Amino acid sequence: MADDHTLGELIDMQLSQNGPMSIATYMSLALTHPRSGYYTGKDPLGRGGDFVTAPEISQMFGELIGFFIVNLWQQMSEPKSFTLLELGPGRGTLMQDALRVAARAEGFLDACHLQLFETNPALKAQQAERLGQYNPYWASEIDSVAEDPIFVVANEFFDALPIRQFVKGTDGWHERQVGLRDGKRTFGLNPTPIPDTVMPEEVRSARPGEIYEVSLAAADVMQKLGTRIREQKGALLAIDYGYATTQTGETLQAVSHHAYADPLESPGEIDLSAHVDFGALARVATDLGLTVEKLSTQRDFLGALGIVERASALARANPGQMDAIGAALRRLTAPEEMGTLFKVFCAHSGDLEAVGFPS
Ligand SMILES: C[S@@+](CC[C@H](N)C(=O)[O-])C[C@H]1O[C@@H](n2cnc3c(N)ncnc32)[C@H](O)[C@@H]1O
């Protein structure tokens, strides 16, 4: 394949040679194609980028997660060696804020082996800059973690993993695909029906036209890390937009420069994501024998960990910043902002109690 083709052209060549591809294949190419994928090229974060994430809004977000992890570590009687793994660490801001707080717990940093899982070279460079002092190790495989207790943090990571979509028909489910019509990328359906019995119980009574989304990649991450957590003890904390129980509904979305876009336009240049089926993650974790907390909201989780008190303390220490701190607090917690859209999921070994979740 010639190097001067855009990713859209490369995908179109593949479609015309091989026929339609699943949405998961299209998303994988668009997001993580080795040369031209969205998450292998530029830094998409921040006001000048395509979207702003919670840790980029305020240091309070990462700080409270730091407190959450220290609490788990203390409950385990402060193991002398453990892995702290962040999935999709972005600019490294969350972990920088978390470790600044965690460093106050004596022995924490000495025991901590920081692992980062990231595809984007531009973001890896920023992570190296912000987190270099903690000697991070970039894992190339999600399950290449050491054999000590493990704490996993993932903010807006699972939503970037590919999904497949199935549309209910009168004769079963048909996979939604990306193909070419008159030389233009378009959605279509695989003609071969898949029987209802293959689908999770929650969606079997769907009416024709309803869409079911499944992320095998997300389930795979949960399975691999959940197995480690069961065997080595620990926890996985994931914050993302999503829903508590498996259900129908289309959530695939494209965002470019803070506005919605057409998912089939400009692959590699726009962000593609889908809401996370936390019900599916919970099933995988529960089947592994982990304890899964009731899905919380970002508002309730940060509230329970003391974000209002932290905001007041910050404002007292930085009176000139009071308005900005208040605005960040609102942005992270107000129901009309990120407060209830974003959910907090935690699966952990049975010996632990997760702070910030209702008991
Ligand atoms: C939406 S950004 C969130 C960044 C960061 N967690 C934050 O909150 O600012 C998604 C992150 O996951 C990374 N990422 C996306 N897909 C990935 C994949 N398949 N494997 C590893 N990292 C991935 C991106 O490069 C980016 O760092």
Image (cartoon, rainbow, N blue to C red):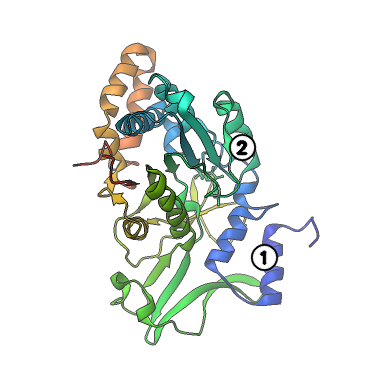
How packed mark 1 is, by other alpha carbons closer than 10 Å (few <14, some 14-19, many 20 or more), is: many
**Residue 117, relative to residue 58: is it above or below?**
below
> What amino acid type should be assigned to the residue bearing mark 2?
Lys
Direction from residue 345 to residue 33 in the image, left or right? right
Disc 2 versus disc 1: distance between alpha carbons?
26 Å
SS at circle 1: helix
- The location of residue 348, given as percent across then percent down, is 33, 46
Q: How many marks?
A: 2
> On screen, 105 above or below 231?
above
The answer to whether residue 46 is seen in the rendering is: no
| Residue linked to disc 2 | 124
**Amino acid residing under circle 1:** Ile
- Quadrant for the C terminus in the image: top left
The spot of residue 318 in percent (x, y) is 37, 13
In primary-sequence order, the first of circles 2 and 1 is: 1
Residue 231, numbered label: none
Point 45% across, 84% down: residue: 193
Per the image, the residue denoted by label 1 is: 11
Establish whether ligand 1 lies closer than 8 Å to the Cβ of label 1: no
Question: Residue 186, percent across and down?
Answer: 57, 71
Q: Residue at x 42, y 66 (%)?
A: 213
Q: Answer with left or right where residue 114 lies relative to residue 342.
A: right
Which secondary structure, mark 2?
Answer: helix
